[in-house]
């Protein structure tokens, strides 16, 4: 007997990044970036965000992976048409880099999906010439 699949959830993920000069120490190769993530449920069913997986790449191509439960201590359930926003931060040892990854979500029917977090860039204004 096969399980009947429900409609798949769809989400739109956007990021906005700010270089935080007051928290950065370029002379010590420490660059601090704050970012706001906006997750909008554009699909027909509710889903709960369970986990996150970030791939952070610096200007030298060094990669750091960060995995964990939820986001900012929460595992929000996002209803259709609803948006969940949160703020976080990322320090780098180079003046620019990028982040991308995925969120693991679960629907009310118990089906798990991976939602892509499109790549976005962390760029110190001084590194733009």
Image: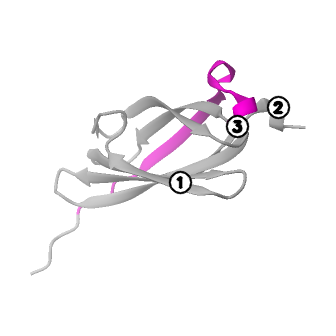
Dot label at residue 29: 3
The secondary structure type at the circle numbered 2 is: helix
32, 74: nearer the viewer: 32
Query: Where residue 59 sits: x, y (%)?
Result: 72, 51
Query: Where residue 57 sits: x, y (%)?
Result: 62, 53
Query: Where residue 43 sits: x, y (%)?
Result: 37, 48
Of callouts 1 and 3, which one flags the residue occurring earlier in the amino acid sequence?
3
Of callouts 2 and 1, which one flags the residue occurring earlier in the amino acid sequence?
1
- Residue displayed at 37% across by 59% down: 114
- Residue displayed at 60% across by 33% down: 16
Pointer 1: what residue? Answer: 64
Label 3, label 2: how far apart the Cα atoms are:
13 Å
| Camera sees residue 21 | yes
Dot label at residue 126: 2
Image position of 42 with respect to 87: above or below: below
Discs 1/3, front? 3
Q: Horizontal placement of 75 versus 39: left or right?
A: left
Dot label at residue 23: none
Q: Residues within 10 Å of mark 3 (few under 14, many from 20)?
A: few
Image position of 59 with respect to 23: above or below: below
């Amino acid at each position: 007997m096969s399980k009947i699949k429900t409609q798949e959830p769809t989400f739109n993920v956007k990021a906005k990044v700010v270089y935080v000069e007051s928290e950065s120490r370029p002379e010590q190769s420490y660059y601090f970036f704050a970012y706001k993530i906006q997750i909008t449920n554009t699909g027909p069913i509710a889903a709960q965000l369970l986990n996150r997986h970030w791939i952070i790449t610096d200007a030298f191509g060094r990669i750091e992976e960060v995995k964990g439960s939820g986001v900012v201590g929460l595992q929000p359930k996002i209803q259709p048409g609803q948006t969940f926003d949160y703020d976080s931060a990322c320090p780098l040892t180079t003046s620019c880099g990028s982040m991308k990854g995925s969120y693991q979500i679960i629907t009310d029917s118990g089906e798990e999906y991976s939602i892509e977090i499109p790549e976005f860039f962390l760029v110190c204004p001084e590194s733009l010439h």
